[in-house]
Image: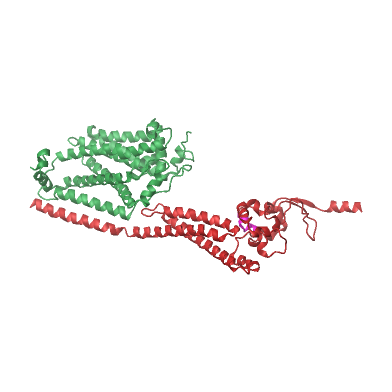
Amino acid sequence: MAFLLLASLALAQVERIDRDERCVECHVDEADVVKASVHGAAKVGCVSCHGADDVNLSQKSGNPHRKTSTFRMYRRQNLAEDCGSCHIAELDAMRPTGHFKATKWGNDQPRAMRGCVACHAHHETARAERGPIIKSCQPCHVEEPRIITDAAEWSEGMDALSKRLGEAAAALARFERRPGINARPLKEAHAAGNAALAEGRIAQHGLGFKAMEADRSRAAGSLDAAYNRLTSDERAFGRRWVWLMPFLALVLTSMILVRTQSRRLTS
Amino acid sequence: MGWFGERTGVSAASVRERMARRLAPSSAVPVVTGTALVVLVLTQAVSGSLLAMYYKPAWDRAHASVESILAAIPLGWLVRSVHLWGAHLILVLSLAHLLRTFWRGEYRAPGDLRWIVKVLLLAIAAGLAITGQVLPLDAEGHGGALVAGSMSRAVGAGRLVQGGDEPGDFMLGRFFAAHVLWLPAAGLALLAGHLALVARRAPAEVQAGPTTLECVGLSGLATLAVLALLAVFAPAGLGPAANPLEFKDEKPLWFFLPAYQSLKFLPPLAVVAGGAVFFAGALALPFVAKRWIRVAGAVALSVALLLGTAGALSNRTIAGMHFNNHGLPASR
């Protein structure tokens, strides 16, 4: 019996898999998805999140992973240790919320309670989409529609701010250092708006939408004001020839005066 | 004789007589270009004084201050445009004014002193253009400061021009002082002398032709109109702030292109020496035997143009010749 066990172990082709290139030999579909994601772009691969594992490469059926202590399959319970090891600020924002506490409760919770991957599909690591999130709020917050509306309003506001920032960036590329057009207020408002957007994207994990709304609407308001000022500057600069006309008329009149005076002097 | 006339000897009648005098075309042309130049110098003085109120001659604030003149100060863009276009027009017109004098041989006595004053005035205009181009410290001005620093070190005047071991705050301070005080003071004094010399020379009276009043008045007014049109319809912009870690070749004002292109082949010392020989030759022109003048002039101009063309056609860069790729002098 002992001999048989030893023989089967000897025949088993167990290897330590600790490089993404090796994972990809089997996990082709996942590899394609990750490669197309923000993690792929940032060169964050399989081993960065899942760690290394011993794998029995000769095993044809079942799970060949040995699930050693270095291997991590994502469970919402280790959200803090895993996603949070890089996304510290988001985790800190989320920590005081009921959603964070709920990740420790057990597997029978609805989707929205299942940690980071509930909203950010795990291999795609996609930016959370508003529709599915809001929908997934409903099972728990069916009695509190205000929470859902607040969240929806907040996300719409973030989208609007992001769109305005794009327009402001395009305007800055056109007008920066152009004579007669003061792009500096827009440049400052754009920087402040970008900071508000980045902060909002982190802070929204803490779900305090009402409190965050003031910061964001202030950023959006000053962005709008600066943008309007820039366009009015542009309009005024476009009409600059109007200022020139009286001056040219004065010069022309003076020229005529010089001619007549010259005739008077010589006559 | 009124109150003013009694004290100066300039009566209304004498001014009227001078203004009514008709000029032959040969006398009218220098009056026209000269008046245009005087008007341009005056607009430069006014626009420059306005710019000096907002410009900050500090290495880390100069670019931002010009940016705010351009955008935030009411009509700052117009004043700066007038100043820049005025500089171009002054260089074009004074070159034309000088070449005409050369062409007609008027540098000889009795015009020799006028010629020397004109050459000195052109040199001062060139100095104002060099210092003025550096002041905004955009990529172009920053490149100009580095090249000027490198040239001055090559001729042993590094500390004099830079105020230190390398271009920085003190160099900008020197350039600013030269641009707004030293050079304009010298230029205005020379210009006053030049005008006094010109006023003493009464041109021959002719029967037909424009009156002096027409030449002076129409030329001055037309200059103002052209300047305003250029400044309003082709307003001067500003390059991005210089990146001190990245030195790229930036072309100087067109006036200095031959010297700039020569730097791609010659050491700075040779370029400075060449410029000095050119300048000394122009000053000595009235006193040199006539047959040498055309030969020397032709050789000097051909060498400058050849070097300029060769530099423009070659793929060498000044950055490669004199700097490492961080814009620091190659010798350091």
Quick check: A210 left or right of A9?
A: left
Q: Nearer the viewer, residue B203 or A214?
A: A214
Counting labels gives 0
Residue range of the region highlighted in magenta in the rendering: A34-41
Looking at the rendering, in which quadrant would you find the N terminus of chain B?
top left
Most extreme residue toward the top, as rendered? B156
Look at 18% across and 38% down and name the residue there.
B196
In the image, residue A38 lies in the stretch drawn in magenta: yes
In the picture, one chain is green; tell me its letter: B
Q: Picture coordinates of residue A129 (x, y %)?
A: 59, 64
In the image, residue B283 lies in the stretch drawn in magenta: no
**Magenta region, main secondary structure:** helix
**From where the camera sits, is residue B123 visible?**
no
Q: Picture coordinates of residue B49 (x, y %)?
A: 29, 44
Q: Picture coordinates of residue B36 (x, y %)?
A: 23, 47
When asked about the image quadrant of residue A203, the answer is: bottom right
**From where the camera sits, is residue B147 visible?**
yes
In the picture, one chain is red; tell me its letter: A
Q: Looking at the picture, does residue A192 appear above or below residue A150?
A: above
